[in-house]
Amino acid sequence: MLKNKWMLVAALGASLFTGPAFAADPVSIVYIPKNTGNPYFDSIIKGFEDGCKTLGCEFTTVAPATAEATSQIPFLTAQLQRGVNVVAISPNSPDALNQVFDRARSKGTIILSVNSDMPGSEDHRDAAILPVDFTKTGPSQVELLGSQIGYEGDIAILSATTDAPDQNVWIAAMKDTLEKDPKYAKMKLVTIAYGDDDPQKSTTEAEALLANYPNLKGIISPTTVGVAAAAQVVETAKRADTVKVVGLGTPNQMRRFIENGTVQAFQLWSPYNEGLLAAHFAVGVKNGTIKNEPGTVFEVPGLGKVTVGEKSVIKTQADLTTFDKKNIGDFNF
Amino acid sequence: MSTTEKTVPNEAGREAAIAKPRWKIWLIRPETVTFLLLIVSAIVASHLSPFFADAGFILESSTYYVEFAIVALVLTLVIISGEIDLSPAAMMALTACLFGTAYKAGAPVPVAMAVSLLSGLALGAFNGFFVTVLRLPSIIVTIGTLILYRGLAQVLAGDKSIGSFPAWFVGIDYRMVGIFPVPVLIFIAVSILLGLFLSITIYGRQIYQIGTSETAAIHAGIRVRRIKMGLFLASGLTSSIAGLMTTSRLGSVRYDLATGGELTMVLIVMLGGTYIFGGRGSILGTFLAAWLLVIIATGMTVANIAINAQLTVMGLLLIVSIIATNWIYARSQR
């Protein structure tokens, strides 16, 4: 009874304090990547960590063992139980997480989709932080390869899994560019192989491409695991002068192939900046300094002015960064 | 039965050499090991994280495992009968994809559900046909069908997910009766029903007989093939029910639904002290093991323990429990 009285007094006391009392609590952010052991996500995590150092937010990261559609759900529930304010996640599925997201948001947790969006399920997250304007990924990959093979000859694509949403969007855009733009009329897409983002399988698939298509002029691999595997296979087969490899890779894994001439150029963006931007955006929205609505402009130290786009999509940079012999020395991730 | 009797039939119906005190018979059982592990893991989990000891949270998290646990109950019967079924997770995916496809084609939800349940029976019958009619080893057959069914699910649904089901169908895990989510109640109900079926009906006894010695069971006039067929049918039907529950929970289906679930199911059955070579085991053990898995997985996840450490703990636990099970059965054989 006495205890209840004190509780009441405490509650009344707390209610006298408004906003500022809560703002003193540091914002807690958790980032859930697709799965463990993927170096690409380590860069995003580094960006989050540095962002939280400057902003004073609490940051943790947890990840499932496999990138299977539902594997992130128990982690999400556990984090909500821990009472985090913001869940940043690179979703393994465009819609399998919707129910859990809805529940989390009804309790006031902010859900940010990081590095890829959830096509068709945009209503179930608060915002999406994308690395780059993804509509340009497909066309600029086709252009990068075309410029190296004189816009002529057989080409192949080496992708990740058959159902990775981002991969399929880019591949559709590549096909579209090849078909509709007369500039690429003489380039022929002969096949799409799937390496499941598994180094061994990607290597086997790349070897099969070289064996089955002797006239192959180029391979586009829009995935970090695939592009490294394809480069390795082309190098081992000593076909680097006839088969050009382009794709999306990280500077550290591709450095060797650029320096020895196996690969002329590849593209990516900065995953580090994504994490940094996501941390700033999350803290801003949580503290009410950034409005989460299209058209809002906010400043991120080191990245300049950032605009929130339609459907709360935020693009970290406009164009892909192309890495080649000239600039690869400037990057370390 | 009085304690003065000199012979006590053990589970397998054999006559034990000397009467053991009843407390020993009750205490030295694999289920007891599972129960003790359950208590210990709950205490450890509470110490690992202040966020763990919350019934609502544990029950909510349990909904991610009860779908597999329900199938594991039927799998317990299959394993006691000396067979194994590794295809339930793939059957969950295929039947759920059939549900989604039927719904997308314009069938009302109840009709689509019927399609899914019937297809579950058909898939179970397919397994049962190879095992009982062609007399092939069930482990080979069901590894084959696990790949086949998963492949068919991918052919059927493609790489896209099928969703936009009506609101009343979605979110079974969020329908509560008191503090219990509906899937948990279904799990408890199925456990009680199957527990009674196994322990008090003639068929239950016969399943144990078949697992202990199939030859003896045939000579005793037990319709072995019919019972095994029934078990595979039950496995298919239960898988389709679990698949529908998963579909309702996620609000969408895809061919990779329940990927890797067969291992979780076998893990639960083994943790519960069922003997992999048949003839011994219990529904109670499987029931307790399901909760053990929920406590351990949830406890470690909420304590932010890295997944590789989690998998290590699970693996060690399985080995410990199998050693304990074997040791107990070896002792009670003497």
Image (cartoon, rainbow, N blue to C red):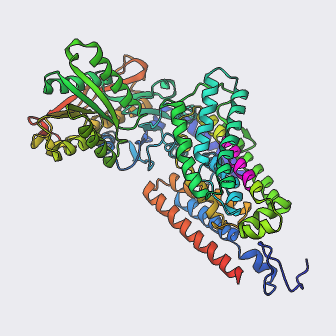
In the image, residue A292 sits, relative to residue B290, either above or below, namely: above
User: Quick check: B28 left or right of A264?
Assistant: right
Q: Secondary structure of the magenta portion, mostly?
A: helix
Task: State yes or no: residue B235 in magenta.
Answer: yes
In the image, residue A285 sits, relative to residue A235, either above or below, namely: above
In the depicted view, which residue is nearer to us: A68 or A19?
A68
The image shows residue B44 at horizontal and vertical percentages of 56, 64
The image shows residue A53 at horizontal and vertical percentages of 31, 44
User: Quick check: B210 left or right of A106?
Assistant: right
Question: Which quarter of the rendered picture does the N terminus of chain B lie within?
Answer: bottom right
Please give the name of the residue rendered at 66% of the width and 24% of the height, measured from the top-left corner: B166
Q: Residue furthest front?
A: B134
The image shows residue B220 at horizontal and vertical percentages of 82, 68
User: Quick check: A299 left or right of A146?
Assistant: right
Q: Write down the quadrant of residue A103 in the picture.
A: top right
In the image, residue B292 sits, relative to residue A83, either above or below, namely: below
Task: State yes or no: residue A326 in magenta.
Answer: no
Using the rendered image of the protein, determine whether residue B322 is visible from the camera's viewpoint: yes
In the depicted view, which residue is nearer to us: A15 or A222?
A222
The residue range painted magenta reads B228-242
The image shows residue B289 at horizontal and vertical percentages of 65, 60
User: Quick check: A209 left or right of A265?
Assistant: right
In the depicted view, which residue is nearer to us: A35 or B45?
A35
Query: How many circles with numbers are drawn on the protein?
Result: 0
Please give the name of the residue rendered at 15% of the width and 43% of the height, measured from the top-left corner: A257
Q: Write down the quadrant of residue A318 in the picture.
A: top left
